[in-house]
Image (cartoon, rainbow, N blue to C red):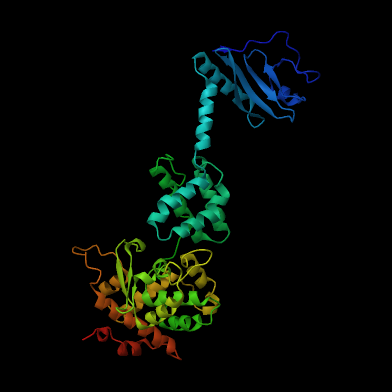
């Protein structure tokens, strides 16, 4: 490799006439005074072999280095002025010069680097890969992850390379979410971003995460909200007059009666039901602990299910969704509650709080913790915890039938619910068959 030799009879740096080889002492002031020509021109730096600045007809100025490889001209562009300072361009020129002297081709290296950058995942691509290859196979709540990414992350970072997202970028995004009055959502967004970047490290896409040592921006209250029997009375009675679809009303009722997770209820399928046995078997792939779970169906639950079976989706889902979805989503159920809190007239609660309500209230009616955990399909880590799916069916049925009666009695009362009177009347042991 050799450096370009200075051309003969250099002309002064003037755009008049046909542009010939021009040489100037490159300074910031000199660069600023360089004018565009009708065609692209290069002005060379005096005393620096092959280093110059290229000016386009529109006035764009870029630092360049021209050298040859086996008699063939090679060009290397360092960056545009004034975004790239002259001092930075000279430093890059010096580095390229050393590579040429060592027999290397800096332009080839630059081409490979640019190709690698073009192939690097954007945040949009990483988000899609995370949802498809991690969230969907592993998380029942993958749709919520997708919603968070599409709402706050992709619109802001989508076209950027994932490797270029910095810790400061993440902090700034979270601060903006908090500033708009959604501190808890900021926590959720951080959790999804962290999982997405950890996923990229596991797949050898990135080597670091911009979420390192970033703490959730907002403190959250302990998750101990449950409805009192008076609130159950209000909720159950006002649900029928709420501005919701008939399908959503029944979804919320089933959520209350079965005490199963929202994701499991919305995906209830007729193929998993046995109305003669009054059971609903949730497949392992839909449960949190990946174990098949048997749910006994109380009289009120059976009544709702029989009604819904008259109009299932083409794939057998009892709660068909909109916009081509097989069934309702967790997000839709959450919105149905949050948007109607004023109508219900009770303190804020979530779909999961309805599940907690049943467990808490059944405890007040002397249902043992172990039996309640079997209803909720909580993992049992004790020795000998592996049991048949039909074990504890009697305990589940007794407890859920009791809970059905607690709801019905509470809703039917025209006064404040008298829990002492109910507890004296509705006893857990009385719900077992002789």
Q: As rendered, which of 123 and 217 lies closer to the eye? A: 123
Q: Quadrant of residue 282?
A: bottom left
Front residue of this view, candidates 154 and 312: 312
The image shows residue 376, relative to residue 408, as above or below, that is above
Q: Specify whether residue 401 is in view.
A: yes
Q: In the image as oriented, which residue stretches furthest toward the front? A: 314
Q: Position of residue 80 (x, y in %)?
A: 65, 29
Side (left or right) of 379 relative to 224 = left
User: Which residue is pictured at 31% across the width and 61% down the height?
Assistant: 290
Residue 174 at x, y percent in the picture = 52, 53
In the image, 371 versus 277, the foreground residue is: 277
Locate the C terminus by quadrant. Answer: bottom left
Please determine whether, in this image, residue 91 is positioned above or below residue 184: above
Residue 366 seen in render? no
Looking at the image, residue 65 lies above or below residue 150: above
Tell me if 64 is positioned left or right of 183 in this view: right
As drawn, 285 above or below 206 = below
Residue 164 drawn at (x, y percent):
52, 40
User: Who's the residue at 48% across and 50% down the image?
Assistant: 128
What percent of the width, then of the height, locates residue 366? 28, 80
Q: Residue furthest left?
A: 384
Q: Nearer the viewer, residue 14 or 363?
A: 14
At 25% from the left and 72% from the top, the residue drawn is 370
Extreme residue toward the top, this view: 8
Query: As drawn, is 24 to the left or to the right of 242?
Result: right
């Amino acid at each position: 490799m050799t450096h370009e030799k200075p051309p003969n009879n250099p002309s002064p740096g003037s755009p008049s006439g046909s542009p010939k080889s021009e040489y100037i002492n490159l300074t910031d002031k000199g660069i600023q005074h360089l004018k565009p020509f009708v065609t692209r021109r290069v002005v060379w730096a005096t005393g620096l072999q092959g280093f110059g600045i290229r000016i386009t007809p529109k006035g764009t100025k870029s630092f360049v280095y021209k050298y040859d490889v086996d008699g063939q001209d090679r060009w290397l562009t360092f960056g545009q002025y004034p975004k790239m300072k002259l001092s930075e361009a000279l430093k890059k020129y010096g580095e390229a010069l050393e590579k040429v002297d060592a027999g290397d081709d800096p332009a080839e290296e630059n081409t490979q680097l640019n190709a690698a950058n073009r192939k690097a995942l954007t945040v949009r691509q990483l988000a899609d890969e995370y949802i498809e290859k991690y969230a969907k196979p592993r998380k029942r709540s993958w749709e919520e992850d997708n919603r968070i990414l599409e709402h706050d992350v992709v619109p802001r970072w989508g076209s950027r390379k994932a490797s270029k997202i910095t810790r400061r970028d993440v902090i700034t995004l979270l601060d903006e979410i908090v500033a708009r009055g959604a501190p808890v959502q900021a926590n959720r967004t951080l959790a999804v971003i962290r999982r997405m970047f950890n996923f990229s490290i596991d797949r050898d896409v990135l080597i670091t995460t911009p979420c390192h040592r970033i703490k959730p921006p907002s403190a959250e209250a302990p998750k101990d909200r449950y409805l009192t029997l008076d609130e159950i009375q209000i909720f159950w009675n006002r649900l029928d007059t709420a501005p919701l679809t008939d399908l959503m009303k029944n979804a919320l009722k089933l959520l209350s009666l079965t005490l199963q997770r929202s994701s499991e209820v919305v995906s209830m399928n007729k193929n998993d039901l046995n109305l003669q046995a009054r059971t609903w078997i949730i497949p392992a792939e839909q449960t949190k602990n990946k174990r098949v779970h048997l749910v006994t169906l109380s009289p009120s639950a059976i009544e709702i299910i029989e009604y819904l079976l008259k109009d299932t989706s083409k794939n057998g889902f009892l709660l068909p969704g909109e916009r081509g979805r097989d069934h309702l989503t967790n997000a839709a159920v959450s919105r149905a509650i949050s948007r109607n809190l004023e109508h219900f007239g009770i303190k804020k609660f979530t779909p999961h709080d309805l599940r907690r309500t049943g467990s808490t209230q059944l405890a007040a009616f002397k249902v043992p913790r172990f039996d309640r955990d079997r209803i909720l399909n909580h993992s049992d880590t004790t020795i000998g915890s592996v049991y048949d799916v039909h074990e504890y069916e009697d305990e589940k049925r007794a407890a859920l039938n009791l809970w059905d009666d607690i709801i019905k009695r509470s809703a039917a009362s025209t006064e404040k619910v008298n829990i002492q009177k109910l507890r004296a009347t509705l006893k857990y042991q009385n719900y077992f068959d002789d």
